[in-house]
Image (cartoon, rainbow, N blue to C red):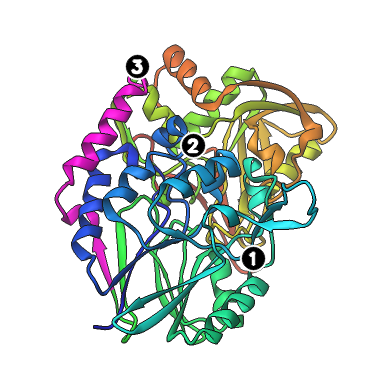
Amino acid sequence: MPPRLLHYSDLENVYDTPDAAGRLATLLQDRAGDDAILAGSGDNTAPGVLSLVTEGRQSLVLYDAIQPDVETFGNHDFDYGPAGTLDIVRASPQTWVSSNTYLPSDDGVDTDLAPFGRDDGVVPHTIETIDGVRVGFFGVLDADTPALNPAAGDLTVTDPIEAGHEAVSALREHGVDHVVALSHLGRGDDDLAELVDVDVVLGGHVPAERNERRHGTLLTRPGSGGHTVLEIDLATGDVIRHQAADYPVDEDVADELRARLGAAGLDEVVGHVDTPIERTEATLFHGESRAGNFVADAYRWAADADVALQNAGGVRDGPRISGDVTIADLVSLVPFDEPVSVARLTGRELQAVLQGARTSDLGFAESHWWHAHVSGATITWNDTADELLDIEVDGEPVDPDATYTLATTDYLFHTSDEFPALDADHRVESLDVQHEVLAAYAREHGVDPRIEGRITRVSRDAHDATEHHAGGKPLDGEN
């Protein structure tokens, strides 16, 4: 029988919906078999509500049920630091592969970098054999991970292309029949396919599905949230898309996750929403959204700031928020142990910061995505020129020489990838953790976010001028 690959990735907060995790477990168990290799391509332990509470160890409930074969790391798998990651590695059944992650040696003698997890079973590459067919795997992580994730700051992540060449050379020398990359490079998968002699790239990092061939290489992504598993026939290259929703719930998995959620004590109701709040890729990354407005409004209120900014990638997708809103719902929106912080900056600096709303070279994002949710400001953006046209604060044009306060997630002071004009020198104050700010705001003001025309995107060239508001009609669904 030719080997089959079962590709899952970016499960993130699936564990916070126990039935969904139970269905995913059943799907993977059903499609597994002697000819199948279960392979994960990162961000399968974090972020999420249970992830934050258990430091990623809720993933072990699923891993024990499905018994994966191989897995690599994503940037969020380091949300609780490298030591927390290794705790999961030691407790999980699969072989973890990573070809380009390193830590300083801790032996007191060797000052060079050591491969991450070398003494805990992490390997740069591995071989799985199915009915005499040898399939080689290696794993690569986005080199920007230490900048994307402050908890991963101790890591050194080297050039994935160079690491890929070395891994493939070693695997080919061992006579493998196929080489498969487990990649958490996002948009960097195209370079991997073009520059490295690899047959299949099982990708992640970008929450949009993919199934296509580039440079003779098959590239797949199952998207985020555990909704989809992709099954790849290595003999033919055919890909079958499986939906977890079509499978019954593994009650053992679901019950264990329910018990952990119940023990977390996050069921306090802090508000009520009449019209469900969508939080999907289509709403979060394409302009103004109700979820983004709620988060940004809470930040601005807590800080008494002129403006608030939330990066779209920091608001996590998941099931609609509807009816009674609990603390767990708010943690699921921004499931990070990071404070809201306040910057003081000039109007000119504020303009430079918001120019990052349409950064096009982020590895985890599609090039056309929108990245800024704001409060207290309105933005006009030229999509044709890809530039900021205008900002108003409290209904007035920004004064380049005036001073403004900006409330935002502390993460944006650490990373140089998103909104790079904002740095630690601008920070003047830090407040409570993000979800605590949201909960306090919900108790005081309720949960009733609306689309208000905060973001206007226009298309202008010499022959045409068109204008549209990013976002849907108030309370009638989202863009």
Residue type beneath disc 2: Gly
Range shown magenta: 240-269
Q: Residue lying at the far left in this picture: please name it.
A: 248
Q: Tell me which residue sits at (63%, 63%) in the image.
A: 100
The foreground one among 445 and 17 is 17
Dot 2 corresponds to which residue? 292
Quarter that holds the N terminus? bottom left
The image quarter containing residue 160 is bottom right
Is residue 472 something that shows in the picture?
Answer: no
- 267 left or right of 32 in image: right
Dot 1 corresponds to which residue? 461
Q: Do the residues under discs 2 and 3 have CB atoms within 8 angstroms?
A: no
Residue type beneath disc 3: Glu
User: What is the x, y in percent for residue 267?
Assistant: 32, 20
Q: Tell me which residue sits at (54%, 27%) in the image.
A: 434
> In terms of sequence position, does the residue under pointer 2 or pointer 3 come before the other?
3
Residue type beneath disc 1: Asp
Dot 3 corresponds to which residue? 268
Instruction: Characterize the local packing of mark 3: few (<14), some (14-19) or many (20 or more) Cα atoms within 10 angstroms.
Output: few
Q: Do the residues under discs 2 and 1 have CB atoms within 8 angstroms?
A: no
| Of marks 2 and 1, the one in the foreground | 2
Q: Tell me which residue sits at (45%, 40%) in the image.
A: 56
How far apart in space, not on screen, are marks 2 and 1 (Cα)?
30 Å
Figure check: 126 above or below 9 = below
Q: Residue lying at the far right in this picture: please name it.
A: 401
